[in-house]
Image (cartoon, rainbow, N blue to C red):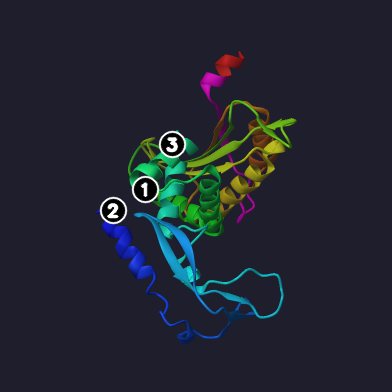
Amino acid sequence: MRELGRLGLEWAYNHVEPQDVTALPSHVEFESTPYTRVRRPTPQIVATLFGKVRLWRVGYRPTHRTGEPTLFPVALQLGLAAGATPAIAERAAYYQSEAGATQRRTRQRLRDEHGLRWGIKKLREVVARVADGMAAARHDVQVQNILRLLEQAWVGTGPHKPVLSVGRDGISFGLPVRGGTVFEVATAGTVTVMNRRGRRLGTVYLAHTPESKQGTMSRNLTRLVTAVLQAWERPLPRLCYVTDAGDNESAYYATVLRPMRHPRTGDRLDGVRVVDYYHASERL
């Protein structure tokens, strides 16, 4: 069945453009740069959900020597990223983002389920393309998700106020950066909504690679919390901050969350800081 899908997809992809190259425009313009059609199509091996297919596509070179690469309109129309279709790129990124996933495990799943034998470089390139494509919309989508959860918590029943809980943590050991001479800590952040019965309705996640003092995580987390408070027009939920007592986690509370004021009213925000018992007992 997978082979039938592969053959059918290859046929469909190769009929997006006319078989007669001269039927295509001899000149096109893309991002204010003129391009001229080449004489004959060239092949590209494309990864799909059904395995690899050979796509014959017509290229357009820059009319003037601008240093821009050859343009392939059909690849843009099909949404190809790093030689992969959007469907398989989404699958690869999803496999890699699952809890406990490793590059080896992801590559094995791609081989077993889709007949693709990718190297680490190829996997990283495709996942990076997906991440870059999602980055522009991530913040707005996360804000809308949190607002939806807050609305669900607000209209629910129970003895407590809804809770908006912010958390962050670093991995338990440093990762080498700068040629392996300096060790920094990667970080993850969460924004969780609890309903009136103390049950978690959902969580939005943030993460960032190792960085000194984790400034990027602090900015992104602050931007997210500020946007939610700006858009939420009902009475405020109970605010809390749940972390261990690490240096970056404590500094973020002291310098950002504790003095934070409401972005619309300017009122001081009252929140509760919770240091998780496991880490606190270890330090004691």
Amino acid type at circle 1 is Gly
- The nearer-to-camera label among 1 and 3 is 1
Q: How many residues crowd around disc 1 within 10 Å: few (fewer than 14), some, or many (20 or more)?
A: some
Neighbours of disc 2 within 10 Å: few (<14), some (14-19), many (20+): few
Q: Which portion, as a residue range, is magenta?
A: 262-279
Task: Say what secondary structure mark 1 lies in.
Answer: loop
Give the class, few, some or many, for how many residues have Cα within 10 Å of label 3's Cα (few <14, many ≥20): few
Q: Badge 3 is on which residue?
A: 105
Q: How far apart are marks 1 and 3 (CA)?
A: 14 Å
Q: Is residue 273 magenta?
A: yes
In screen coordinates, is 268 left or right of 133? right
Give the percent coordinates (x, y) of residue 170. 60, 32
Q: Residue at x 52, y 86 (%)?
A: 25
- Report whether residue 162 is seen: no
Residue at position x 47%, y 82% from top? 21
Residue position for label 2: 2
Considering the numbered disc 3 on the image, is that residue within a helix, a strand or a loop?
helix
Identify the disc placed on residue 115: 1
